[in-house]
Image (cartoon, rainbow, N blue to C red):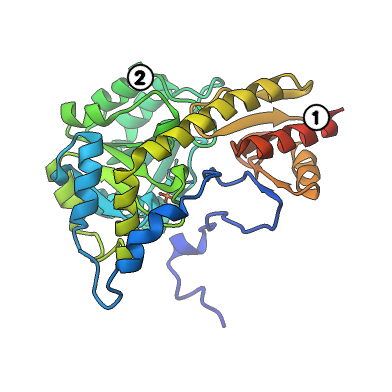
Amino acid sequence: MNLNSLIRKEVRRLCPYKARHIHCRVKLDANESPYSYPQLLQKALEVHTNRYPDPEGRELKRAAARRWRVGMRNILLSNGSDEILYYLVTTFGGPVLFPAPTFSMYGIVTQALGQKALSVPLQQDFDIDIRRTIRAIRTHRPKIIFLSIPNNPTGNSFSMEKVLKVVEETRGIVVIDEAYQPFSSRNHIMLVREYPRVVVMRTLSKIGFAALRVGFLIGHPEVVEMVNRVRLPFNVNTLSQTVATEVFNNYEIILEDVKRIKEQREYLYARMSSIRGIQVYPSDANFILFRVRGARAVYRRLLREGILVRDMTQELEDCLRVTVGTEEENRMFVEVLERIMK
Ligand code: PMP
């Protein structure tokens, strides 16, 4: 079968997102939480399976709005924050600008929707190159700028001064993707109040609920209303709405584990930094990027020992990314890494 003549050329060129299920003992590749919360599933058992979900997800919105101190009209719910990317590009179109390297879905979604994706390389220290970014804004007038803060895969948060410069310079929508915000000391929701063109994305995926697929857009009510026009009805299923509401109602449990993950990140950072031949980058997220000569071979040797990390060598020379796991998982990872590097 030759589908080529049928398929849009943008899709013909597209590389799908690399999310592979590789069997391993210690899974540290996908920035998931090592903690699961089966106790929060109780209410999901009472769900009426025959009825459609609440199309507006009001209970969940109410719980999230309370936690983030915003109005319910500031929030749009989605089936994972990935889906919001589709909605944003569908609503506003391109060109779409983002730094590189960053979360690959910004480029994939933009291309899939036939829009122009433009990237500006980050500086050596992985902060925004503000001169080149401003030049790109003036030349291409992007409709959307994506900033992942903390940035995946580098782990750092861009300097606030530069973020504000970007916001002041562009006339487009600035999307601050806070997927890793729980692990950082930065928070940009207050910018939404000050700048109606700034929107923030959040997700439950990194704090223990990747299985639910629940994401949020937080923005000015007018922006949220526009994006809501392209949202699919019932995009967040009842089971996910119910459990996600429970997550917000029991948030202290999550915060305790987030604290544990942050402590483990510091432990991992210190242990990895003491290994000769490895350059470790500081992180505000639940993962750590590191550079090692022959990264591909190191990746394979880790995998042979049952430890799965993320190969970032296509985006950053000789770089791998490891997710912070449980204390035991982190110790196993570091010990194997030490052995490999001897
Ligand atoms: N943004 C960033 C920066 C991410 O790293 C990820 C997950 N890899 C996402 C968004 C997507 O998260 P979700 O599971 O909510 O779709």
User: What count of labels does the image hold?
Assistant: 2
The residue carrying mark 2 is 160
Q: Is mark 2 within 8 Å of ligand 1?
A: no
Point 33% across, 27% down: residue:
187
- Asked if residue 94 shows in the view, the reply is no
Residue 14 location (% of width, % of height): 51, 58
Question: Which residue occupies the extreme top position in the image?
Answer: 161
Q: On residue 72, which mark appears?
A: none
- In terms of secondary structure, where does tag 1 sit? helix
Question: Which residue occupies the extreme bottom position in the image?
Answer: 1
Decide which of 82, 23 is in the foreground and name it: 23
Q: Is residue 235 above or below residue 138?
A: below
The residue carrying mark 1 is 338
Q: Quadrant of residue 273?
A: top right
Q: Quadrant of residue 271?
A: top right
Residue type indicated by callout 2: Met
Point 74% across, 37% down: residue:
332
Query: Tag 1 or tag 2, which sits nearer the N-term?
Result: 2
Neighbourhood count class around disc 1 (C-alpha, 10 Å): few under 14, some 14–19, many 20 upward: some
